[in-house]
Amino acid sequence: MFDLLKDFWLLFGRLFPFPTRPGLRKAGNPDRSSPVLVTCNFELTVRKVIQALERDHIDAWVLVAPTKGINVWCAAGGGHFTTDTVVSILKTSGIENLVDHRRIILPQLSAVGVNIWALKDRTGWTPHFGPVDINHLAAYLTGGEYRAERRHRRVEFPLKERFIMGTNLAFNSLVFLIVPFLVASIWVTGLWWKSIALLFLLGVLNSVLVLWLPGNPGVRKGFSLGLLASAVFVVMAQTAWTMEPAATLGWTGWIVLLSTYLGYDMPSWSPLWRADVKELVTGVKHTHVEVVPERCIGCGLCTIVCPASVFELNPEMKISRVVHLEACQACGACIENCPKEAIDNNFRAGVCSCPTCTVINSVKSHKRKDAERNGGETEPVAAAGCCESGDCESGEIECSQHQWIPDNVI
């Protein structure tokens, strides 16, 4: 029953951290040869990981790292799931006394914050990045080598996750808009509760239909949905509800405005698009990333850590190359783990531009300026967006997927 209540809350409130106790967990009956997995201490993720391992009859040790209750991708992008974090859980869990090998499997989406070269040097453990989805872990472990199929390296946004993220998108927007709704209701009776219902409907539709709506992700898709929804509303208002023309016109404009706003914010709740203001408003992609051939050693790690299949390894030249630039999410995993700094880009130190992060970063910037004027300590300004808790402090890597929290990442 308690798990059901937690799942109900997470249907709406994934904006907020939901921690569980860090430390060592068992899945099944692991022995000294069983695999060692690392994950975050976001309660839902830990529960889903254990359930999936036991369902697939995989005996494993699970190290739950202290990531402030934030999911893998957000914690990695926000500076809470890092090389230091993994070193810490390895040293404090006592796992080295329970296994004969020195191999650990990291979540692929942690590559934004975890450098496996530094991790190996500091601990003596050999790290591997597992598949994106825990449901593919059984195939990964039984394949003879720790190597995931390319299709299991790519992050997806299925219908179920789109629905859940739509409810979270609406709930998060409500946090910011509830006061204006209530104030406006002084002049327009019932505006607040009608707007809340409309907000949740449009939030879910923006997320569920995002792959099929016309236009590029962001404002354009939200506007397209607004036009579609307002057309349906006008027909209903003039036939079934006999609404006055002036009221119909007002609500039509309100529907389009709300839907456009939600369309702008929706990519920050998804794993497929970068939450950049220029891209979300103009629809023009300006992300740049390329491999410098002279520096690339052909290790292929960028093809492993990239969740969007942007790179591929050229078998003839034995170097990596960019093949799907349009899919780049600017997460920074390739940059963090390239051993030769062979990847040029234009998105380091970026700031997420979703409405939530805009507010949070503005507040932090204001506090920093106040501290500077008062001669006190300055607080770092978030470089990666709110990452659920609003306290990201990563210095270089942008967390462009800071809201998307799937159930099944390792």
Image (cartoon, rainbow, N blue to C red):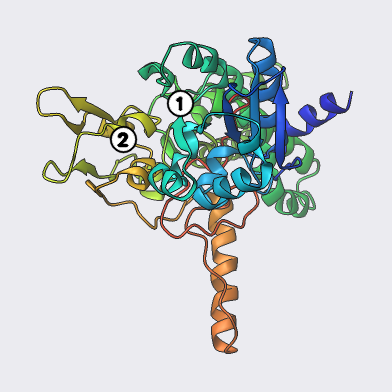
In this figure, which residue is indicated by the disc labeled 2? 302
Q: Which mark is residue 369?
A: none
At a point 21% along the width and 42% down the height, the residue shown is 290
Work out how far the residue at label 2 is from the one at label 1, CA to CA, in angstroms.
15 Å
Q: Image height check: is 217 above or below 173?
A: above
| 409 left or right of 24 in image | left
Disc 1 element: loop
Q: Please name whichever residue, 31 or 283, is drawn nearer the observer in this view of the structure.
A: 31
Q: Please name whichever residue, 285 or 242, is drawn nearer the observer in this view of the structure.
A: 285
Q: Give the number of callouts.
A: 2
Q: Where is residue 208, by image quadrant?
A: top right
Q: Quadrant of the C terminus?
A: top right
| 332 left or right of 93 in image | left
Asked if one can make out residue 246 in the rendered structure from this viewpoint, the answer is no
Q: What residue type is disc 1 on?
A: Val
Q: Which mark is residue 155?
A: 1
Q: What residue type is disc 2 on?
A: Cys
Disc 2 element: helix
At a point 48% along the width and 35% down the height, the residue shown is 109
At a point 49% along the width and 26% down the height, the residue shown is 132
Residue 21, image x, y percentages = 76, 42
